[in-house]
Image: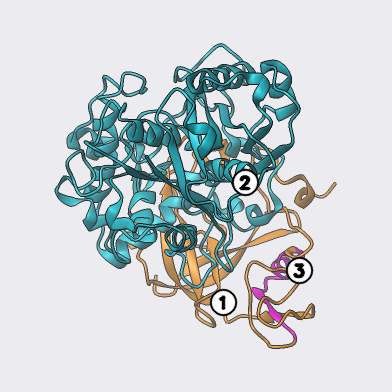
Amino acid sequence: MAATLKDATAIVGIGQTPFARQLDASEKTLACRAIVAALDDAGIHPSEVDAFASYTMEETAEVEIAKAIGAGDVTFFSQVGYGGGGSCATIAHLALAVSTGQATVGVAWRSRKRGSGPRPWRNTRTQLPTPGQWTRPYGLLRPADEIAMLARRYMHEYGATRDHLFNVALACRNRANQNPAAMMYERPLTREMYMGSRWISEPLCLFDNCLETDGALACVVVSAQRARDCRHRPVYVHAAAQGLPSQHHGMVNYWTDDPLTGPSWTAARHLWKHADFGPQHVDVAQIYDAFTPLIPLSLEGYGFCRRGEGAAFSEGGALEIGGRLPINTAGGGLSEAYVHGFNLINEGVRQLRGSSTAQVPDATTCLVTAGEGVPTSALLLRS
Amino acid sequence: MSSIMKGTTDNGPLLPVPDEDGAPFWEFAARGELRVQCCAGCHEPRFPPRPCCPRCQSFDSEWRVTSGRGRIWSFVRPHPPLLPPYAEQAPYNVIVVELADDPRIRLVGNLVAAPDAALDSVDPARLRIGAPVVVAFTELAEGVRVPRWLLERP
């Protein structure tokens, strides 16, 4: 067994359902469809699956999934907390399990009817006691409000403007316009549309917010040795990290000494320590984008620029194809689909297979990140 | 059942749902006092409240009265879709205040023209990071008072 996680495992199968504001099938059915598609993509029979990893917010339980798809005896299963912060960690947990011999074929998935289902923040009766008691009575109700608070402070400290946030929204939309599977495939975005759109929580407007999507995605993880026998070019898990910074307080991160240094900084330090290359050698990145300000904050955290420079980094088409760091090449949560960031993992795999609809030429390395602001996770993938 | 246990008034604003650690904050607030939990051993303040001091691991704490003064650290103006009692006042402000006594202690709140005024009662042009503010209390429901913030120089 490997003494290190580095390149010991690979993602060999990806699957997904269509993305839409409303799909008729249940979350369980969508999950099964994505998982069966991912296993077919890998060329692995469902009876070989012996590990599962998902989010604590995932409402399709592994017992139900395993029973439905016809999995074999399962010897590893885990769930990761903190919503979109857990996306990459699901793959990381499978990589740990497979590389240490706890399992051989792992499936990670996310199925969600966020487009047609309820909005979690609307529930008035079952509040989280902490930190809800410190925020909700004052009308700080939604994730958009919580991130807008950080965004305003960030703009104040570093001179970031709405044009910088527009650069982020536009890069994601332009890639979605190249991706027939994206919800915003045929919906171009202009600066005029962005600047004239309605506010959600000032300083964030409609286009600073992710989509509301029904859909499911899945990935299959096996050992590097096994990966060579699968249908597609293996995409190796080069490094993986989770990040919960000292004294962090969840998404309402106003209570640490430095709220603009979020969990991405913690995950990044671990990630780069265990990698053979650094941020300057990342060909393409899939950065969690529930809200546009998460991109400059993550660019700083993962070391693509220095503290306070993330907004300026987006200038001059840097985030577009051909730019310094093309991001979210399927459209991301802002313009492809918002499925808690799992679509960013699948797109990372497509880039390193050379099969993206917005392919970065000769891409061999890809950073995928989970939600910034919440306890997070990240993956460095390589072909 | 008291309204503080229900978590909301009927069609009114959400009420704080205290946990064991946070309960003293709301008990002091009900008396019109803004207090912050501090370690009884090393005297380090901490927020949100918690059972143990992250600096010296003491389980003994005390609630130190604050000056009730601070500065706006950041602010937002939420627009609908929002829960009905908030949508009615939207766009309103929500601010984060850093306390003058210890700027590392930050509280979420609202800037209002008077303690019982609506959440949209201050001209948005007056919202400014760094603006000095002073605490006031309003009664959201019977026995439930929450801190609000007034501009120190209105």
Q: Quadrant of the C terminus of chain A?
A: top left
Residue A20 horizontal/vertical position (percent): 44, 19
Outermost residue, left side: A316
Colour applied to chain B: orange
Pointer 2 indicates a residue of which chain?
B
What is the magenta range?
A: B23-40
Asked whether residue B112 is in view, the answer is: no
The residue at which mark 1 appears reads as: B68
Outermost residue, right side: B1
Circles 3 and 1, Cβ within 8 Å, touching? The answer is no
**Can you tell which quarter of the image residue A363 is in?**
top left
Measure the alpha-carbon separation of dots 3 and 1: 17 Å
Residue A318 horizontal/vertical position (percent): 20, 48
Q: Amino acid at mark 2?
A: Pro
Q: Amino acid at mark 1?
A: Gly
Label 1 secondary element: loop
B34 to A198, vertically: above or below? below
In this rendering, the label closer to the viewer, 3 or 2: 3
The residue at which mark 2 appears reads as: B13
The lab-note entry on whether marks 1 and 2 share a chain reads yes
The residue at which mark 3 appears reads as: B24
Who comes first in sequence, dot 1 or dot 2? Answer: 2
A214 to A278, vertically: above or below? above
| Chain ID for cyan | A
Label 3 secondary element: helix
Residue B73 horizontal/vertical position (percent): 43, 67
- Depth check: give the residue in front, A298 or B24: A298
Who comes first in sequence, dot 3 or dot 1? Answer: 3
